Image: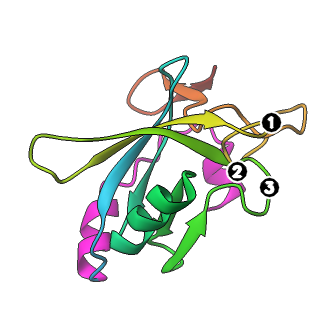
Amino acid sequence: MSTDLEESTALQLDFDKVAKIGRDGHQVVPVVLQDADSGDVLFIGYANEEAFLATLERKSAVLYSTSRDVLWHKGATSGDTLELVDVAINCEQNSLLYKVRKAGTGVCHTKGDDGVARQTCYYRSVVDGDTLRFD
């Protein structure tokens, strides 16, 4: 990801993301990661079978990076791991909800003006069809 995209106030939605995942042959399901205490949605990732089983075993969020084609234990390098509290599955069994507790200082790989990892990856709101604002 580029800093231009992550720190921009220009709306640049990637409507091709899911199609790219399919074209590349990734066998994954979307995972919503939610703070178990506040209910805040932290971010959305993907899990393949190996990442899902590793999450259950570690009791900590492990995801599959569709852009790097690797498993990643969230927070393994930053220390901002997410302790697993509960796993829910939707009615069609094609997406997961991980209820988690933060074990570090933040969640997002981006940092605010204070240099600290943001508390959620949803740190901007849509103003109109072209513009975002930082919350």
**Position in image of residue 24 (x %, y %):** 31, 82
Which structural element holds mark 1? loop
Q: What element carries label 3?
A: loop
Closer to viewer: mark 2 or mark 1:
1
In this picture, is 106 found above or below 125? below
Look at 68% across and 31% down and name the residue there.
119
Residue denoted by label 3: 78
Residue at numbered disc 1? 105
Where is the C terminus found, in terms of image quarters? top right
Residue under label 2: 109
Residue at the farthest right position: 114
Amino acid on which the number 2 mark rests in the picture: His
Q: Are marks 1 and 3 in contact (CB under 8 Å)?
A: no
In reply to whether residue 12 is colored magenta, the answer given is yes
Residue 68: x percent and y percent?
A: 54, 78
Q: Quadrant of the N terminus?
A: bottom right
Horizontal relation, residue 10 to residue 105: left or right: left
Percent coordinates x, y for residue 82 in the rendering: 62, 44
Q: How crowded is mark 2: few (under 14 residues within 10 Å), some or many (20 or more)?
A: some
Which residue lies at the image location 86% right of the left edge and 32% below the top edge?
Answer: 113
- Sequence-wise, the earlier of marks 2 and 3 is 3
Residue 126 lies, with reference to residue 3, above or below; the image says: above
Residue 36 vs residue 106, the one in the foreground: 36
Q: Given the current orientation, which residue lies at the most extreme front position?
A: 57
18 part of magenta stretch: yes
Q: How crowded is mark 3: few (under 14 residues within 10 Å), some or many (20 or more)?
A: few
Color encoding of the figure: rainbow
Amino acid at dot 3: Ser
Q: Give the range drawn in magenta.
A: 1-24
For image coordinates 53% across by 36% down, the residue present is: 100
Mark 2 touches mark 3? (CB < 8 Å): yes
